[in-house]
Image (tube, rainbow, N blue to C red):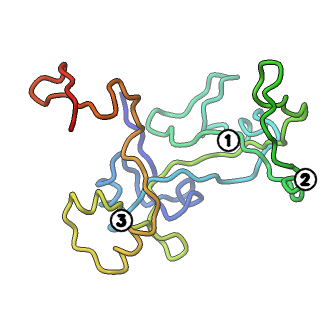
Amino acid sequence: MTAILYPVAANAELALSSPLGRATREREARAAAREDVVFTTDAVGPAFATREAALDAYRNRVDDDRTGASPAPEDRFCRLAEQVVAEPGKMARLAPVAPTFEDGRRWPVPPAERPRTAWRLMVSYWRIATAERPIEAPQARKARRTRQNLDSETLRAIARQPLRPVEPQQPLDIGLFDTRLPENPSIVVPDE
């Protein structure tokens, strides 16, 4: 299977038109950019009212299930996404909803009208740091494991950023105060 070659650029528009290079992994992107990069996905271009209009506009960029056309496997860094259009003043009219607990239902029936949506092109790429969008400080866990020497400003930035998981949390299959033995993972013992 061919890996996707993501563009290396300062923003999503440049990623589509004139990237500095293409890379699968972070170290390849860093070598192409000659500086630090971060993987991100941003919306570009106009918003379309229908999916068909967006598919027509981005014919060679995304998979078109109507015609069966699709980009090359290494060029699958674009996709269409439906986003809710924020209407000014409408959010202020919505009041908080309290649970009802009536007729076996916890929440009231949602309103019949759907919120207005639009289709946008989402581009995944390796973003280079710019003055407008600097790259975040590394997570404390990563900085500690790689034994980085960090200045005081970076340490303050690490302390201010929210905690993010390394991977999605897995469901617990054992008790909270139980642990598996390292020499035999099939045995669960109390952890005290």
Q: Secondary structure at mark 3?
A: loop
- Contact, mark 2 vs mark 1 (Cβ under 8 Å): no
Side of 55 where 127 appears, left or right: left
Q: Amino acid at mark 1?
A: Tyr
Location of residue 66 by image quarter: top right
User: Which residue, given by chain and number where applicable, does mark 3 sit on?
Assistant: 36
Q: What residue lies at 82% left-to-right and 41% top-to-bottom?
A: 49
Q: Amino acid at mark 3?
A: Asp
Q: Distance from label 3 to label 1 (Cα)?
A: 30 Å
Sequence order check, earlier mark of 2 and 1: 1
Q: Position of residue 114 (x, y in %)?
A: 85, 35
Location of residue 184 by image quarter: top left
Q: Position of residue 35 (x, y in %)?
A: 34, 68
In the image, which disc is placed on residue 23?
A: none
Nearer to us in this view, 123 or 90: 90
User: Which residue, given by chain and number where applicable, does mark 1 sit on?
Assistant: 58
Q: What residue lies at 81% left-to-right and 47% top-to-bottom?
A: 96
Side of 61 where 180 appears, left or right: left
Nearer to us in this view, 25 or 155: 155
The residue at the far front in this view is 192
Q: What residue lies at 33% left-to-right and 48% top-to-bottom?
A: 25
Q: Distance from label 2 to label 1 (Cα)?
A: 36 Å
Q: Which quarter of the figure is the N terminus placed in? A: top left
Nearer to us in this view, 173 or 76: 173
User: Which residue, given by chain and number where applicable, does mark 2 sit on?
Assistant: 93
How many tags in the picture? Answer: 3
Q: Distance from label 3 to label 2 (Cα)?
A: 44 Å
Q: Amino acid at mark 2?
A: Arg
Sequence order check, earlier mark of 3 and 2: 3
Q: Which quarter of the figure is the C terminus placed in? A: top left
Nearer to us in this view, 29 or 152: 152
Q: Position of residue 168 (x, y in %)?
A: 42, 38
